[in-house]
Image (tube, rainbow, N blue to C red):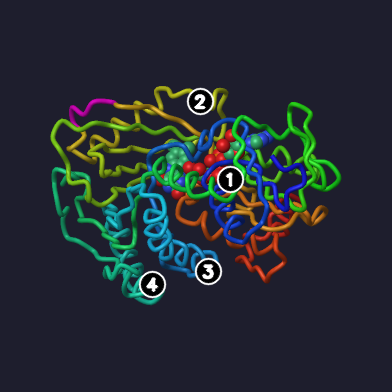
Amino acid sequence: MPRAPDLAIVGGGIVGLWCAMRAGAAGLCTVLLEKGRIGQGASGGFLGALMPHQPVRWTPEKAFQLDALMSLETEITLLEERTGIDCGYRRCGRLIPTRTEKKRAQRTDWQAAARQNWPTASPGGKLLEWRLLDATPDARWLARDAAPLGCEFDTLSARVSPRALLAALALATSRTVHIRERTAVARLHDGGAMIVLDDGTELKPGRVILTAGYETFDFLEDMAGRRLGRGVKGQAALMHPLQPVDPHAPIIYFGGVYVISHDNGLIAIGSTSENEFVDAAATDHRLDDLIARATMICPALEGAALQERWSGVRPNAIGRHPMIGPLPACPRIVVCTGGYKISFGIAHRMADAALGFVTGQRSSVPPRYATAAHYACAQ
Ligand SMILES: Cc1cc2nc3c(=O)[nH]c(=O)nc-3n(C[C@H](O)[C@H](O)[C@H](O)COP(=O)(O)OP(=O)(O)OC[C@H]3O[C@@H](n4cnc5c(N)ncnc54)[C@H](O)[C@@H]3O)c2cc1C
């Protein structure tokens, strides 16, 4: 491992890997340091929903996410061609059941807003729209009772296989970047001019991208003197349905419950949101409740066999938006984290922005993503 690389990336989750891809493409001598295995953090799950924000009350942050969701389709196609790994990407759309008249009236506005703010077609040529349906399109997938006033259907939402995407990124990246697993960063010294590993090894990188998921906030607390975010635990389940389901079925999203059909015939269910937790890796009765709620919405889950229970901790920055940019007091360190529930759809664009800061090229992020905006929230 080079001891004085141009760039050290701390963390091998979805964001760190995209940063590594971009750094390799830019020709930087880069090391990626991961304390465990690639994807052992929040990125190693199986949900993979890529869902747009509501199209109403348009902001630069929503525009950033939209651009990211649109461009990801092409990025993944290129990655699949380079690696031969199928990333399980599909623009499957999303169903949101409508249960009250108030919501139905509100959603007419959303339909109009989608027409105004979204492009008309995806890069693959799929029509992008927000439709109101009078009834569920498939009562075995979304139960009639769950959608008494019909549902909304957007064709922009997509899904990906998180583990396949990580594997593809790791393979592509390993050709240009030094990836070091089981290599924990213990401390950053001298404003990032020195990295000390937990075995005492010292590195002197030119620049650092700090993308250690929710643990980024521990590093930042030391350097910024304030708490800039926290971890929010989530639990999820992977189910094997009794009868085969359409792998291209739209994501069902209702009241924080996601139901996602994947190419491998399995159905992913997510997610809890827990601000307080003792054991980040444990699953419990909250997941059983979630499975029960998902089964009420989605009859295809009745009798399904549980394949895997999983939990992870999402990085949630204090400003409730991703946090990207140099640290005000230590500009050598670029922070890139806080994707919370939308990281998989925007991580490649977060990486573009982070690399822009590293190389000194013009890099702009939406105002609420800037580190200064988060610092202001923490005062
Ligand atoms: C149940 C659940 C469901 C989710 N569903 C979705 C979804 O459908 N769609 C979506 O977009 N997002 C989803 N998310 C959120 C998404 O998974 C996270 O936002 C994303 O994985 C964060 O990626 P990251 O790279 O920032 O962090 P992580 O994936 O956590 O990566 C950080 C890495 O840094 C490493 N690290 C930490 N400290 C050190 C150190 N000192 N030295 C070296 N390495 C270190 C960790 O080991 C880890 O591998 C979900 C999350 C959960 C928990």
Tell me the amino acid under the disc marked 4: Trp
User: Do callouts 1 and 4 mark residues in contact (Cβ within 8 Å)?
Assistant: no
Mark before the other along the chain sequence, 3 or 4: 3
Q: Residue 316: which numbered mark, if any?
A: 1
Q: Secondary structure at mark 3?
A: loop
Q: Residues within 10 Å of mark 3 (few under 14, many from 20)?
A: few
The number of numbered discs placed on residues in the rendered structure image is: 4
Judged from this view, the residue extending furthest toward the right is: 190
Mark before the other along the chain sequence, 1 or 3: 3
Asked whether mark 4 lies closer than 8 Å to ligand 1, one says no
Viewer-closest of 177 and 318:
177
Image location (x, y in percent) of residue 104: 28, 61
Q: Is residue 237 above or below residue 60?
A: above
Viewer-closest of 138 and 126:
126
Tell me the amino acid under the disc marked 1: Asn
- The residues bearing labels 3 and 4 have C-alpha atoms spaced at a distance of 13 Å
Q: Is residue 51 above or below residue 229?
A: below
The region drawn magenta spans 302-306
Q: Give the residue drawn at x 63%, y 52%.
A: 336
